[in-house]
Image: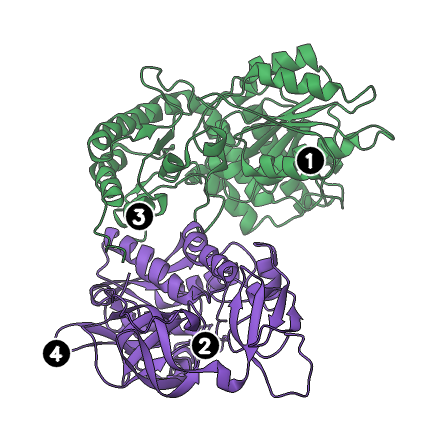
Amino acid sequence: MRVLVAMSGGVDSAVAAARLVRAGHDVVGATLKLWGGESDSGCCSVADVDDARRVADRLGVDHHTFAYSDEFDRHVVGPYVDAHRRGVTPNPCVECNRHLKFGALLERADRLGFDTVATGHHARIVAGPDGVRRVARGADVAKDQSYVLAGLTSERLDRVRFPIGDSPKDDVRREAAALGLRVAAKADSQDVCFITRADGRARFLARRLPLTAGVVVDGGGRPVGRVPAVETVTIGQRRGLGLAGGAEPRYVVATDPATATVTVGTEADLRVARQPLADLGWAAGPVDGPLDWQVSAHGAVRRGAWDGGAVAWERPERRVAPGQVVVAYSGDVVVGWGTAAPVQDVRTDQAIEPHPLGA
Amino acid sequence: MTPTEPVAYLDHAASTPMRPEAVEAMLPFLAGHHGNPSGSHAAARVARRAVDDARDAVAALLGAAPGEVVFTSGGTEADVTALSGVAAASADRPGAPPAPVVVGAIEHAAVRDTARALGAAGHPLHVLPVDRRGRVDPAALSGALTGAATGGTGAAPAVVSIALANNEVGTIQPLDDLAEVLVRVAPDAVLHTDAVQAAAWLDVATLAAPAALVSASAHKLGGPKGVGALVVRAGTPFAPLLHGGGQERGRRSGTPNVAGIVAFGAAAAIAVAERDERAVRVAALRDRLADGLLTALVARAPGTVETVVHPGEGRAHVLPGHLHLCIPGAAAEEVLFLLDTAGVAASAASSCSSGAAKPSAVLAGLGVPDALASGSLRLTLGWSTTDAEVDHALAVVADAVARAVTPIEVEPAR
């Protein structure tokens, strides 16, 4: 099989490539040059390209660098900034996977004559008796990345491999060390690869959109605090709101950049019985009954069932920030994927139209 | 897996194979003659003599007196030394405004970025537009120099840098016409020309005669990488970039790369001796490749054009080894990947940015739209190119290009 391995310069994709070589496949490595700006690590810096190339050299495979910074800007950085402008949560890793690694790269791999694209993601691909392929959790639960891959269609998954998805991270590192790969002890990448720790989200955004100082109000509309930038406030946040101390902890329950207003409430106010979704797709048709729902990249799952318009939680759960990706699992297997809607927009009288899962 | 060595090496403008004579000439200086030419003993004299012989050969290639040839680490150092050297010399005039810097819109990055840095340091910067063939308009040069001269009396003379031949598209500049403008409008202006690409193909000694400074590089004409030369003609205002032991008559300190310089000399001698015969032979190969490819691509990648060569106008204004195409709808990275797999070594633009492709500033300078520039393909032939290599390229290039422009099924957006 002819395999194009997306090599980020990290240990996971290095071992992914090594395993494919050992299995006898015709392997070529490619590093995507995504971001021209500053980066702590992740997919973008020259050092990471160098690491990927040196690993490929060591494995005896060709290595190429593909420039995708325009596409990255258009599909990841632009929407990231725009989501903050609108007061909704961006999902940069989800967008990058969908548009870059399993979008543009997959299409390019087709044109270049490759059978599949492989990456170093901690996730697995399982096929049901119906023949439909689904993303499943990686063996290392702490490193599992199925959440950011959930939206891949069965057709795309047919052309994708995750060679290290069945291994704990420690095994991956041991294997890299045994192979003498220089990246064996390299630190894991950050979540948002295009924002450095030194710069931070607020300064990154401030250079790209006008940030609006906002007023913090309680449930009765009374001003109780101020925030320097309403665009950077997140549902569930309890610090940096300028609130007087001493009282019962208060959390952000809603933000509205249009009126520069942040609404806070108690922990009880933060919790809702039902979480509406803006859209939802199923891997292979709707699944009735309780499922595990994951509402952030590394968060714990909650139990709940889709009732046709919202996820009805088994017990009240903290509301999910609008725009946030919500993934439904049956056991370890992704069965659905959607986007959170604002809680105040719940329309319990009307079911939303499900979309086909994926692109 | 791609073959270790390509079947058709068509990237001679990036680096051309070393001449066997050049390899042979340098070997004794890698193992044996280890003296530092600056010394005073017998071993030093052996090295000194070899460097001076090479200097004679390079001087003959570039049309300079041997004492005007300064060996450098390559073409980039020669370019940077030329622009910075003249600009720095102008700074020696107390109270005078900084010397204006005038460059063409499609100069090599070594010139372009040095000019930009000098601009940022306070030198008035003028970038001259080029016509559709890539040639600088003498009237634009005249305008820039007239504008520059209004800086007031006492202003340092301008430094003007225009490559004798472009590295990406191969356009040959009519340097004589530009020099005429200088004589008329700004007789004090200092003209530099980057002859790195031209040196293998053109009579640089004649064509670059009007330039006070001339850059060249060994590995573009059959010498090794890591050695180049800058001609600094007598009387040129010049301050060195590298200070130190005063080698190269104080114009470039540092122990010379003796083996590399010796090989440069050997390659230069051959380049001069058989230049005209080679230029005719390679141009014929290039024309066969160009005409065959264009015919095949018109059908398979409609809209493909030969950059800076317009129908019915011939290729006399382009270096004999250069063929540059713009293919609409093709990503250069994919074309190169497929060519690599098919045993053809080519490049998208210049080879200066290792790794990922960047949009070409040269094509932007030529006014090539982004949609065309992103599908750029440079095939460059050289002294060792054979009929068989051209045959192989003709057999596989059109196919590879067609695959890169074939739209694939994209899943519908939701």
Neighbor class of circle 1 (other Cα within 10 Å; few <14, some 14-19, many 20+) is: some
Q: At 42% across and 80% down in the image, what residue appears? A: A173
User: Which amino acid, mark 4?
Assistant: Pro
Give yes or no for contact between labels 1 and 2 (Cβ–Cβ under 8 Å).
no
- Is circle 3 on the same chain as circle 2? no
User: Which amino acid, mark 3?
Assistant: Asp
User: Which amino acid, mark 1?
Assistant: Gly
Which numbered disc, 4 or 1, marks the residue closer to the eye?
4
Q: Nearer the viewer, residue A192 or B172?
A: A192
Residue extending farthest to the right is B94
- Is circle 1 on the same chain as circle 2? no
- Of the residues under marks 1 and 3, which one precedes in the sequence? 1
Q: Which type of secondary structure does the marked residue at label 4 adopt?
A: loop
Q: Position of residue A86 (x, y in %)?
A: 49, 60
- Quadrant in the picture for residue B258: top right
- Quadrant in the picture for residue A150: bottom left
Which numbered disc, 2 or 4, marks the residue closer to the eye?
4
Q: Which type of secondary structure does the marked residue at label 1 adopt?
A: helix
Q: Which type of secondary structure does the marked residue at label 2 adopt?
A: loop
What count of labels does the image hold? 4
What mark, if any, has residue B119 been given in the picture? 1
Read off the residue under disc 2: A184
Q: Nearer the viewer, residue A185 or A353?
A: A353
Read off the residue under disc 4: A129
Q: At 38% across and 29% down in the image, what residue appears? A: B321
Q: Which type of secondary structure does the marked residue at label 3 adopt?
A: helix
Give yes or no for contact between labels 3 and 4 (Cβ–Cβ under 8 Å).
no
Read off the residue under disc 3: B340
- Of the residues under marks 2 and 4, which one precedes in the sequence? 4
Which of the chains bears the disc numbered 1? B
Neighbor class of circle 3 (other Cα within 10 Å; few <14, some 14-19, many 20+) is: many
Q: Nearer the viewer, residue B154 or A278?
A: A278
